Image: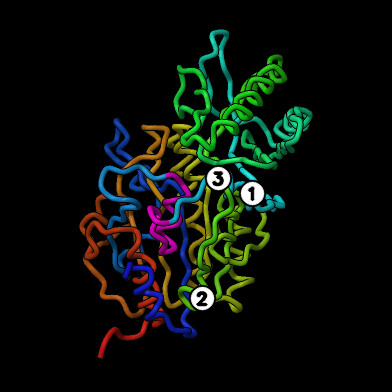
Amino acid sequence: MDRMNQVSQLAVSSPGKIVLVVLDGLGGLPHPETGKTELETARTPHLDRLAKEGICGMSEPLGAGLTPGSGPGHLALFGYDPFAFTIGRGILEALGIDFPLEKGDIAARGNFCTIDAKGAITDRRAGRISTEVCTRLCEELSRIGFQGMKVFVAPVEGHRFLLVLRGAGLSPDLADSDPQQVGVPPKEVVALSREAEATAAVVNSWISKARGVLADHHPANMVVLRGFARLPHLPSMGELYKLNPVAIATYPMYRGLARLVGMKVVDCGRSVREQFDTLAKYYAGHDFLFVHIKRTDTAGEDGDFKRKVEAIEEVDGAMPQVMDLKPDVIAVTGDHSTPAAMKAHSWHPVPFVLHSPLCRPDDVMEFSERACSKGALGRFPALDIMPLALAHAQKLTKYGA
């Protein structure tokens, strides 16, 4: 029996409340001038207090040396084995914007990007164009049609959009066109099975036509696609863990993932302060409250060390609003590391703190990579976070006689 089913069989309903705060891409690398990471540089008195009173460690989203995408990273935090539950990024984007998917639809996440005269990508995010510009470009791309098939192009946020194919005989067994690096051209979409060959031909034809439509639009003069998928079925967190969960997330992809695992997704404004105000608003009616902070990851991907420090400090400044509620468990971590030095997700483990009246505090005195690496939890799988949180909220019964 796998770990998730074992934990599920022990789960019981209780009044205990769990708040999980995820600073996307939290982990970092030392700045060459100071030798300190973004988290070590930030002034975080409230997170430090949680670390002093709680128990700490370094979480590995997938395992040593493996770099996670945001979807797998979050699935692990919610107690779902990311290797057993593979979810294409396109589905998460579709759910995040409430796109009315139908059975058999194929969804992909798209980026507007910038290519040079030779066709090489110079900016994977097209200068982070505004959502308004993205919306206008999606309207133009929506005019590309195919006989016997419906193609939908919908804006998500900033440079990101959703592509949905609807028709007979489609397959999601497609490789990405996004090389996820600059200096090289977008890849051809390759069929990963014989059944997907016709679908690959359609997608490549659409990309070619999209390039023509976008030729005079700078910086968004090309598209890349990834995460082709159909809508999967996952057991809900209510079914698995007897929880009544709510998600407080601003970015569509994370709202979509939360819906997929059965969380109630609520409107929460755009700022960190509005998100924590929303947490307080819904606190009484839910026993699992997930708060997702996107700004830390965006700053890391942009290579902006200072902005990532500021984002961490902004969250720390809002933490007293959570602490004053006195939940049974406060857990703070990230879904992966996004060091500004790398401008990308990385394989480095992520700082983690669990604060609860029932925990045994360790000797950690601050919330940082160096300090948490010496915590009592050591280096551990992110899949252990959910059972740890459930146990400290007294939501797991005894195993065996």
Q: Amino acid at mark 1?
A: Gly
In the depicted structure, whether residue 50 falls above or below residue 202: below
Crowd around label 2: few <14 · some 14–19 · many ≥20 (10 Å): many
Q: Mark 1 vs mark 3: give the one in front.
A: 1
Is residue 45 visible in this depiction of the protein? no
Q: Amino acid at mark 3?
A: Ala
Q: From this viewpoint, which residue is outermost toward the top?
A: 117
Q: Determine which of the numbered discs, if any, sits on residue 243 in the image.
A: 2
Which residue does the image show at 31% across and 86% down from the upper left? 398
Of the two numbered discs 2 and 3 on the same chain, state the one appearing first in sequence: 3
What residue is pinned by disc 3? 229
Which percent across, then down, holds residue 158? 64, 36
Circle 1 sits in a helix, a strand or a loop, which is it? loop
Crowd around label 3: few <14 · some 14–19 · many ≥20 (10 Å): many
Q: Amino acid at mark 2?
A: Leu
Circle 3 sits in a helix, a strand or a loop, which is it? strand
Q: Estimate the spatial distance between the alpha carbons at disc 1 and disc 3, rounded to whole Å.
A: 10 Å
Q: Mark 2 vs mark 3: give the one in front.
A: 3
Q: Indicate the quadrant containing the N terminus: top left, top right, bottom left or bottom right.
A: bottom left
Q: From this viewpoint, which residue is outermost toward the bottom?
A: 401
Which percent across, then down, holds residue 264? 62, 67
Instruction: Look at the image and give the residue range highlighted in magenta.
Output: 69-84
Is residue 251 visible in this depiction of the protein? yes
Which residue does the image show at 66% across and 53% down from the upper left? 103
